[in-house]
Amino acid sequence: MTACVEPGCTGTYEDGWCNVCGSPEPSQAPVEATPLRPGPDSAGQGSGGGSPAGSGGGSGDLAGADPDSPAGSAAEAHVQTPAPGQSSRAVRAQAVRRQRAQAARRSRLGMGLTQVPAVPPGDPAEAVLESPQVPEHRRVCPNCGAQVGRSAGEAEGRQQGFCPQCRAPYSFTPKLSPGELVAGQYKVEGALAHGGMGWIYLARDQNVSNRWVVLKGLLNTGDQDALDAAVAEQQFLAQVKHPLIVEIYNVVTHEGDGYTVMEYVGGTSLKQMLQQRMADNGGRYTPFPVDQALAFVLEALPAFAHLHDLNLLYCDFKPDNLIQEGDGVKLIDLGGVRRADDLDSPIYGTVGYQAPEVAEVGPSVASDIYTIGRTLCVLTFEFRGYQGDYVDTLPPASSVPPFVAHDAFFRLVARCCAPDPNDRFLTIDELRGQLIGVLRQVVAADSDHGATLSAHSAAFEAPVSTGETLSWWELPEVKHDEGDPMLDWISGLPTADPAAFYQALEEADDQTPEVLMARAMAGIRLGQKGWFDTAVRELLREDPWDWRASWLRGLWALSQSSTPASQGADEETVARRRTTAGQEAAGHFAAVRDALPGEVAPRLALALASELGGYSRAAELDYERCWRTDAAYVAPAAFGLYRVRRSRDDEDGALQALDSVPRNSRAHPRARWLRAELLRSRGALADLRESIFSVSRLTLDPRQRAQFNATIYEQALEEVNRNGEQENWRLGEVPVTQDALRRALEKEYRFLADYTPDPQERADLIDRANAIRPWSWT
């Protein structure tokens, strides 16, 4: 068996799935995690208690262990005495590896990108209710939904009786008592909770190691829909075997009633954790930090993928139905699960979470994704009106702090909850890939330095920019679809003659998306709008929601910002053309950003388009997001920040951007040169000294270095003439005195004269050298 590659997971892959974290066995290298750091608002969030599988509420003991507690630190800091023949350095290395392993285990949720406190499992027996009752506000008729069992005056509401509206019987009294033996095998310990479809009981399986199990009964045996749902569970839930989904052991009958026997899951549901956070904060709603909420959902997505692979739909995802135990989660309450092709069984969902189209067309993969988006909302902000005014919509982004703080998170939720199912993510795998990218951006948002690690992208290649300018052809390329049958044929075509290359593509027998993409790119490179428009139209005919069409249109618009038609035009015309092209491109790249909120490439393209279009603040924000999130984007984003900040005379900010270009980047020499030029333009001696140091280690053309040095010495000499000498200062090896600067300047002039082929220019340089050299008595 192969070990799981998810950070911190100790499981192995069995039948394509990890037996611990539930993630699928990867077919390619996993996404590399960024360094661990404590997540915001993480202290005091540990949990305990014992919420069973299928429970819908209640509160548990949330006094959990803090991973940053002194006890934990002491354990990590313990260093063993070196064994015979073992050096202290080896012992220290072992301690470091042990610390990293412990940190990874604590942070398995969220792929190690953030830190979520673990929830220790509680004692199941302590979760049994002493006096099980259904609150009056939750008592409704199982037949017509009318309010029943409500108090009248001083009299308490009835736990059982007949609906005054439809006369159907109802009962909210648990049918099983402690000590009762169900099906001759399961000894009841007591009631745990009352869910949407009936009471849930804790029991022990006397035939299998006395293990804890959960019995889920019906709300009322006279409820035909509930009975049908139980029958549906019997038919297909037994095939659902996944480490992230509660396991169904059996379906039994007892005294004429049916019960589903399922795995007991300890830990605490996300709903209970929200309730406890609210109680700890004096009754004020206290949502999870966005990175933790994303980590919870990310961990649960393989369970959805497994269900969808089995042609099953979950239908009723919400915070009640996801339980955290230890550093993992488990999806519970399969009461609403149904076959994707089932058109007859009753549909179970929750108002505020269920997709708007379900009532008319039924559930689908898209409606499951909708529930995931709504759950992310409830986990991250006080979603007032989510079952009323905003039952089918989202509140304005400007009124939601997490949306304002994390634009990518808003885009992710907006696509999950799009009114049109076709606008949502197509599959859980697609959602998972984008959610990982959004989590990276959320975690990186609090960073004050550029990213140090790169992430794998399924959609784009890495950017190739190596200088301060960024053009459309330097933006990341869309990755090829390796499954396209024409890809090998395209790669074998000769490209020396662009027109012949396009002609061959146009005459291809099979106009697959890769062929159409190649045709569109050929049109962009040669400025042939007819070629381009035809290819994009055919691409959209294949798939009207293909984001690649918007990407291509953005590239075309950018390519028009510096067309041959601009040559010979006045500066105002050229600037206007550039602005118009940038604004048009920004609209197209914004569509790609909305479709792929977790990708960095659309952010870089949008930043460039916004910069050209005159939206400098928007450009800076997107450049900063790229700069913080992915190391492959640090250099092009840093140059973008340099340009934007320089345009508004923020020289310190421009210098900081240039300083962030990594030393191992091909763009680092250019960044040092620009840094030197910016410092030189300031003219102060301190800036001149730093400027000459910036280029001291660069490999420059001899004439270029001499010209740069001469300019520095000229400016320094002017400063000395105005403010006096600084004998203790040096510009490189040259003291900041008149005599030393004159001699250095004379030397550079004569060096430049030797490298100048023009006789007149050479003579001018020699004259300047003679004029600047110090007086002598010899």
Image: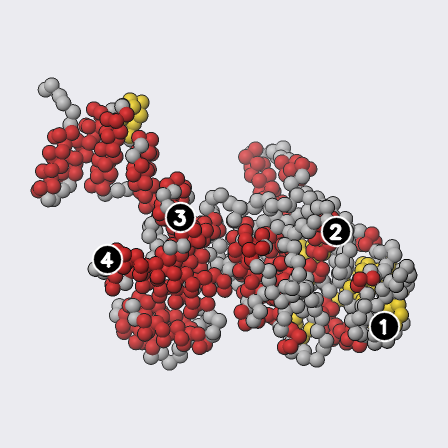
Mark 1 or mark 3: which comes first in sequence? 1
Q: How many marks?
A: 4
Q: Looking at the image, is mark 1 or mark 3 nearer the viewer?
A: 1
Disc 1 to disc 2, C-alpha distance: 40 Å
- Element carrying mark 3: helix
Q: Amino acid at mark 4?
A: Asp
Name the residue nearer the viewer: 141 or 262: 141
Q: Amino acid at mark 1?
A: Cys
Disc 1 to disc 4, C-alpha distance: 83 Å
Q: Which residue is mark 2?
A: 121
- Element carrying mark 2: loop
Q: Looking at the image, is mark 2 or mark 4 nearer the viewer?
A: 4
Q: Looking at the image, is mark 4 or mark 3 nearer the viewer?
A: 4
Q: Is residue 588 above or below residue 449?
A: below
Mark 2 or mark 4: which comes first in sequence? 2
Q: Is residue 175 above or below residue 632?
A: below
Q: Which residue is mark 3?
A: 641
Q: Which residue is mark 4?
A: 570
**Label 3 crowd bin: few (<14), some (14–19), many (20+), radius 10 Å:** many
Q: Looking at the image, is mark 1 or mark 2 nearer the viewer?
A: 1
What label does residue 163 carry, if any?
Answer: 1
The image quadrant that residue 683 belongs to is top left
**How is colour applied across the structure in the image?**
secondary structure
